[in-house]
Amino acid sequence: MKILKYFLLFIVVFSACKKEEEDTVVQLPNDYGNGMYILTNQGVSFYNYLAADSLRVVKQNIFQNVNNRNIQQPKSLHIGGGKAFIIGDQLYIANIETFGNEGIVGGFSNPISCKAVDDDRLYVVDKGTSSVKIVDLSDLEFSSHIETGDSTMPTFILGSWYRAFVLNGGGNDFASRDSSIVAIDYSQSGVPVNNFSGKLDLGYNPSSATYSANHLWVLCKGVYDTQNPTTNTESSIYKIAPWSNVIDDNKNLSGIYNADNLAINESRSRMFFTTTDGIYITDLTIFPVLHIPSVDAGFITINTEQINDSTKVEYLYTNDTNQSGKVLKYEAWTGVFVESLDVNGDVLDVVFY
């Protein structure tokens, strides 16, 4: 009887300890939040450019350091709803304040980019299946998917108000080119939907897009096949009314090839894009001028920064594939080089939050 009593006491104590362990939640410090997030082929790094000069330091590979787990094959980074969404071999989700892991979603063929359309849904572009897969963020399960067309190989998504646009980037060679973009309505009268709402045919291989005040601008890089340059075609740009899916204007970019990474400044008055020659700048009448030559850039990010009590300056951030591990910073309007920032790995993108 005495042995039974001690045994029961041990069970009670053990159960209480186990429950206490289960109820214990590790509180991660809010070390991140507002700042610059740098995606490299090694992971995500953080730079608090808003801090005093003496406190500015690059925190390398923050997802790995916080969660003791690597991001495999990083490709793109999107921030929305207080979360960082990192596309790699899978979808990695992190809290933007702590960068603690909030879930990993697999089941993609070749995920490329994503867009949080509200707090509950994430649209993920899957190039391998030519579709947009819709992730329910409440349970991290696929709730639906939308086909973008047979072998269209979508590569880019953006959205605003109630409609997302997916760019079918096609392939580099002439035979695998594509010319279409797909519109998807994700809200109707405030009600969440996932409705295909139209398809537009533009120039060869739509590669990137941005919004001005009233229009969607789509940059088509054209065919650019380094193995067969005789089939190469010039790039083009399209001005589209996003609510009616109507092309209002388009221009061929004479003498410009492989244009990509379209970006616009905060006042929506100037656009920038990369080419084989460097970075171009243009106003909305589309007369592009070579702005920063001889930079083999893979992205452009424009950020407005307060440099003193009365002055704000727009800066352009980019990379150069010939300078591994560096984020390059220029004055956006003048193209004057300002400084570089050293990080681990090849820089793929910069996102501000």
Image (cartoon, grey):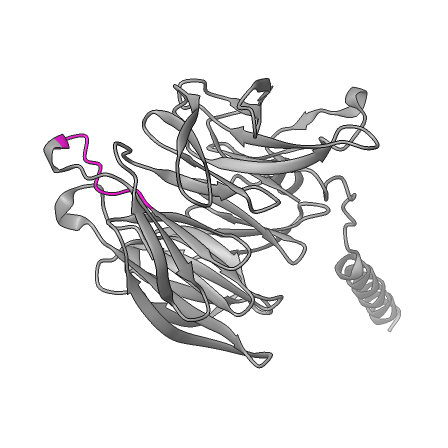
Residue 277, located in which quarter of the rendered image? top left
42 falls in the magenta region: no
- Give residue 342's position: percent from left, percent from top: 58, 20
- Total number of numbered discs in the rendering: 0
Q: Visible in this render: residue 105?
A: no
Q: Quadrant of the C terminus?
A: top right
Residue range in magenta is 220-229
The residue at the point 36 percent across, 66 percent down is: 246
> Looking at the picture, does residue 247 appear above or below residue 324?
below
Left or right side of 108 for 103: right
Q: Taking 300 as reference, is 307 left or right?
A: right
Q: Quadrant of the N terminus?
A: bottom right
Residue located 81% across and 66% down the image: 7
Residue 268, visible in the rendered structure: yes
Relative placement, left or right, of 216 versus 342 is left
Q: Is residue 93 left or right of residue 166?
A: right
Q: Position of residue 8 (x, y in %)?
A: 83, 70
Which is the main secondary structure of the residues drawn in magenta?
A: loop
Q: Is residue 222 magenta?
A: yes
Residue sitting at x 29%, y 60%: 129
Question: Which of 88/263 is in front?
Answer: 263
Q: Residue at x 55, y 30 (%)?
A: 317
**Up-down: is 83 above or below 255?**
below
**Above-or-below relation of 1 to 82:** below
Q: Where does residue 117 sit, x and y in percent of width and height? A: 55, 64
**Residue 72 rendering spot, x and y as whole percentages:** 45, 41
Q: Nearer the viewer, residue 154 or 240?
A: 240
